Image (cartoon, rainbow, N blue to C red):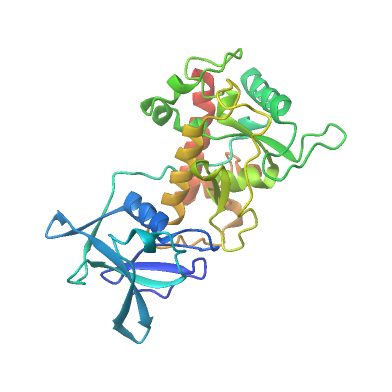
Amino acid sequence: MAAPPSPSRNVFVFSREEEIAGFWQHGNVSKGRFREWLEYCWRFEQGGSPVAWSLAERCDPANLQVRRVICPSADKEMAKEAMPPGTFDVLSDGTWQPVDHVSTSHVYHRRTISLNSSSPSSSKSITFADRIRARDRKCLITGLTTIHRSWTRLHAAHIFARAHLDRWRTLGFDDLVDDTGRQLGDAKIDSVQSGLLLRADLHAAFNAHEFAVDVDNDYAIFDFTAAGGEHGGRLDLDHLEPGSSERPLDALLRDHFWQAVLANVRGAPEVHDEEPDDDWTNPDTLRMDNDALHRTETGRLRLELELGSRLNHLVT
């Protein structure tokens, strides 16, 4: 039997009784848009071949055979409707049989807070932070400004994590940067076009992919958490003309959005153990003598990413 649905979602999708996807619907994700998310995460097949599929709602939790098709593959008008909360199965069109699900080639790359993003540990970081502060002057989501010229509540955040420099180069993002600032390095990953000024807590949430910017929906904020505190807002880029060499790149924001889809939509929800010494998003826990960094899988991954971020900073 499938595990009970997690309260971190109000939309649950199953394939052959395995929870394969879901999200928290705040009211503005259409059925068609959700299908795009599912197809980004999974391929649906029968007998090893692609199959047309639909989502069918379980109308009676006690009887899995009582279903209602709510998202057929060919109905463009229904695709415009809001995706309703509920529990759904992926079934083949016409025959309404279970289908196989195969993960797509898209990989989620977890990231962690980069201490270099907002701390004066090197000249490159200072240049990145100073340029982001001078450009934005406020949190681009909440509008929070500095108090007495203190930047403690505002962080210069990388849109694309420096720890994943190899992926940055593979995707050709360095070729998209036309920023002419000094001290960028060959990779250009410290360009202001890969940066945003965010409130400190939103910096952590952005790195954790708890919310993302939907570039193709007028830069609307999609909050993947149940609380939805930032949902419905908008990334304020009004001070930067489209095409400006200082404007954040749409390609980077779009990549971050799809990474957030992989993190929050694909698979069953991640269960977080109560391990305060292994807090993923707290920069104060990154101590070499912190046993959690060596003892736990998430701790070792965090250590690897932090070291990668710092080493990549030296070579870029």
In the picture, measured across the screen, residue 103 lies left or right of residue 128, that is: left
In the picture, measured across the screen, residue 204 lies left or right of residue 138, that is: left
Point out residue 231 in the picture as x, y percentages from the top left corner: 61, 55
- Residue lying furthest left: 47
Point out residue 103 in the picture as x, y percentages from the top left corner: 28, 52
Is 147 in front, or is 286? 147
- Residue lying furthest right: 148
Q: Vertical placement of 18 versus 135: above or below? A: below
Residue 281 seen: no
- Residue lying furthest front: 77
Is 114 in front, or is 32? 32
Residue at left 70%, top 30%?
136
Q: Quadrant of the N terminus?
A: bottom left
Is 77 in front, or is 17? 77
In the picture, measured across the screen, residue 290 lies left or right of residue 23, that is: right
Q: Vertical placement of 3 versus 66: above or below? A: above
Is 202 in front, or is 291? 202
Point out residue 66 in the picture as x, y percentages from the top left corner: 30, 83
Residue at left 61%, top 56%?
276
Residue at left 62%, top 31%?
117
